[in-house]
Amino acid sequence: MEADLFTAAAEERREKDPSSVPLAVRMRPRTLDEVAGQRHLLRPGSPLRRLVAGRSGGPAGPASVILWGPPGTGKTTLASIVSNATDRRFTELSAISAGVREVRAVIEGARRAVGTHGRETVLFLDEIHRFSKAQQDSLLPAVENRWVTLIAATTENPHFSVITPLLSRSLLLTLEPLTEEDLRELVRRAVTGERGLGGAVTLPEETERHLLRLAGGDARRALTVLEAAAGATLEEGATEITPAVLERTVDRAAVAYDRDGDQHYDVASALIKSIRGSDADAALHWLARMVEAGEDPRFIARRLMIAASEDIGLADPQALPTAVAAAQAVAMIGFPEARIILSQAVLALALAPKSNSAILAIDEALGDVRAGRTGPVPAHLRDSHYAGARSLGHGASYVYPHDLPGGIAAQQYAPDAARGRRYYRPGRHGAEARYAEVSERVRARLAGERPVPPQAGETAPTGPGTGRPDAGNARPGETPGDAGARGGEPERGSEGSEDT
């Protein structure tokens, strides 16, 4: 970058008084090897490596690049490294303040530099998504003819914010949010390094964890908060940055939560037990604790899917689809918006009628299997779709249920050792109350008994999905009870909220 008198004066002041420069700027990496994260963009032969090397590589010159990623992931840092490492002319513009006139001036200067001195120009354009279409169009001739090598940075999706012709002339490089390990390395380097705080303060592990959660993958934010907390600590005459100082610095309480320890599991347990107990307000409190602590939203969503089957089940058949939809949504969206989706799912599950019949049923069946109560598959249920199966008696006496009125064949389905065992014991809340009636009628038909008709004067719901269809749903030759035995999935009734 070509220095002027003001730039030179600023550099001289920085050397005399490092505190006049923000910690995030002082700690900015000077080489690609110092960059935290983004290993996928820094492999040998990568476009950024070639730009830093400053070599044209024969007939293949360096390509223009568009750096796309969240704030604080290193876009400006990478451009700064290029400016310090290459012998090319380096010019920096910000789309916030620059216009077409400034862009054309840079391009004209680049053309003169190539023609007069043979020097190539690297143009770093920050916030390119703020440029209008006309402003971006003005870059096309320079990029296409390589009068400038463009390094453009954006936090918005370039497929929507950058014109297609410019995208086609550049390489799109995606920067990922920094991991906790990346940030930890950066913060520790800032605490002890000469360019940073020089060991003037210490950062205990508890405070460090809270600082990393506050950073949210943003290196600049991590260093800004660290510098503010260090300043407050030194003013108090102390050297150790405590969680209390960090809280006062950012005006945000430190949540007692360890993603790898007891708090992680205790708070998750409290969330599920509050949902099971139908206390929506308590469930939202525990959810908020997890969100504020930076818990992985996918972990929360997985717990909700389990609760939907373990604690609600058939009492509300829509609970599991709701939890699955929430899990899919948070995986695509992430925080902060994912908090709304998780809140909706938690409320739906907490207010739903409850039943644990699904987990009790499968665990009891597993208990029988593990106890050896198994036995061979009955001959009439065995596979008969191969030559010679019938001669062995496989499937010979099997009765096809669809050929019978009511669609239920009274034949043995369980092995002898488990015959007559009842694993499913329906709850009496919400939609499962109807499943309870249907299951009893089906069991009676399977045993060869006629189902008991409703008692006189009984006010039973009728219609599709209730377990007692009206006469219009019954097949010829069957009673409404028969039709109910083959009836489809019950619908959730209006009494579901009362059952909670």
Image (cartoon, grey):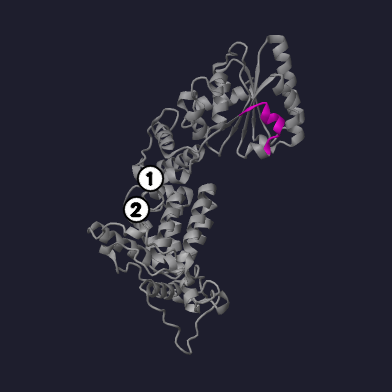
Closer to the camera in the image, 214 or 70: 70
In the image, farthest residue toward the front: 391
Residue 2 covered by magenta stretch: no
Is residue 169 rendered magenta in the image?
yes
What's the amino acid at mark 2? Ser
Quadrant of the image occupied by residue 390: bottom left
For the residues marked 1 and 2, what is the alpha-carbon distance in whole angstroms?
75 Å
Name the spot of residue 434 as percent of width and height, x first: 45, 74
Tell me which residue sits at (40%, 48%) in the image: 386
Q: Neighbour class for label 2 at 10 Å: few (<14), some, many (≥20)? A: few
Q: Nearer the viewer, residue 478 or 169?
A: 478
Quarter the C terminus occupies: bottom left
Whole-percent x and y of residue 185? 40, 34
Residue toward you, 43 or 11: 43
Residue 292 position in % (x across, y down): 45, 53
Left/right of residue 437 with respect to residue 146 in the rendered view: left
Identify the mark nearer the N-term, 1 or 2: 1
Left or right of 430? Residue 239 is: left
In the image, residue 331 sits, relative to residue 415, either above or below, namely above
Q: Which mark is residue 207?
A: 1
Residue furthest out toward the left:
371
For the magenta stretch, what is the residue range?
161-171
Q: Which residue is mark 2?
A: 391
- Find residue 294 and report its horizontal and vertical position in percent: 44, 49
User: Which residue is found at the position 53% from the left and 52% from the top?
Assistant: 329
Residue 186's disc is none
